[in-house]
Image (spheres, helix red, strand yellow):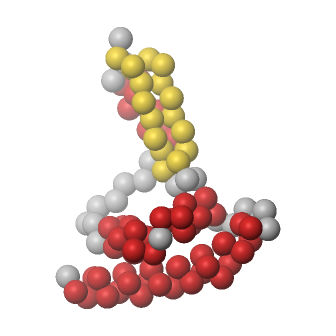
């Protein structure tokens, strides 16, 4: 466990440096075209400790699933939900809700 924490601390530190040196200055200039822009700026607002925890959580799971919008939307259809609302959160994940009839 300590090795995972150590390695993710290094990775998080490198990414945090990238956020501070590239993403944040470009964001202040209104340049928001880099990949993961919304995601990194979101974490910048939460601070390094939260970011490191997220990097750790993403690095250690045995299984991670990533779904396209169409796959996610199908879950709501199969559940028979109406008034479905699906939004792209931070340009990296989906959030949705619906109403049961």
Q: Horizontal placement of 18 versus 100: left or right?
A: right
Quadrant holding the C terminus: top left
In the rendered view of the protein, which quadrant contains the N terminus? bottom left
Count of numbered marks? 0
Residue 19 horizontal/vertical position (percent): 60, 76
Q: Position of residue 49 (x, y in %)?
A: 39, 74
> Relative to residue 64, is residue 15 depicted above or below?
below
Q: Nearer the viewer, residue 31 or 82?
A: 31
* In the displayed structure image, the side of residue 36 where residue 74 appears, left or right: left
Instruction: Report which quarter residue 36 is drawn in.
Output: bottom right
Residue at left 45%, top 35%?
A: 96
Of 60 and 45, nearer the camera is: 45
Q: Position of residue 87 (x, y in %)?
A: 54, 39
Most foreground residue, 100 or 69: 100
Q: Is residue 89 above or below residue 75?
A: below
The reply to whether residue 71 is visible in this rendering is no
Residue projecting furthest to the left: 1
Residue at the image point whose x is 47% and y is 70% from the top: 47
- Name which quarter of the figure residue 17 lies in: bottom right
Residue appearing at x 28%, y 66% in the figure:
61
- Residue located 51% across and 29% down the image: 85
Question: In the picture shown, does residue 86 fall above or below 22?
Answer: above
Residue 87 visible within the image: yes
Q: Percent x, y for residue 37?
A: 63, 63
Task: Say which quarter of the image contains residue 56.
Answer: bottom left
């Amino acid at each position: 466990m300590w090795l995972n924490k150590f390695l993710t601390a290094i990775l998080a530190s490198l990414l945090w440096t990238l956020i501070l040196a590239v993403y944040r200055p470009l964001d202040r200039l209104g340049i928001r075209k880099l990949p993961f822009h919304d995601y990194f700026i979101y974490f910048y607002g939460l601070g390094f400790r939260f970011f490191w925890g997220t990097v750790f959580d993403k690095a250690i799971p045995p299984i991670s699933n990533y779904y396209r919008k169409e796959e996610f939307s199908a879950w709501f259809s199969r559940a028979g939900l109406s008034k479905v609302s699906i939004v792209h959160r931070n340009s990296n994940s989906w959030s949705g809700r619906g109403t049961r009839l």
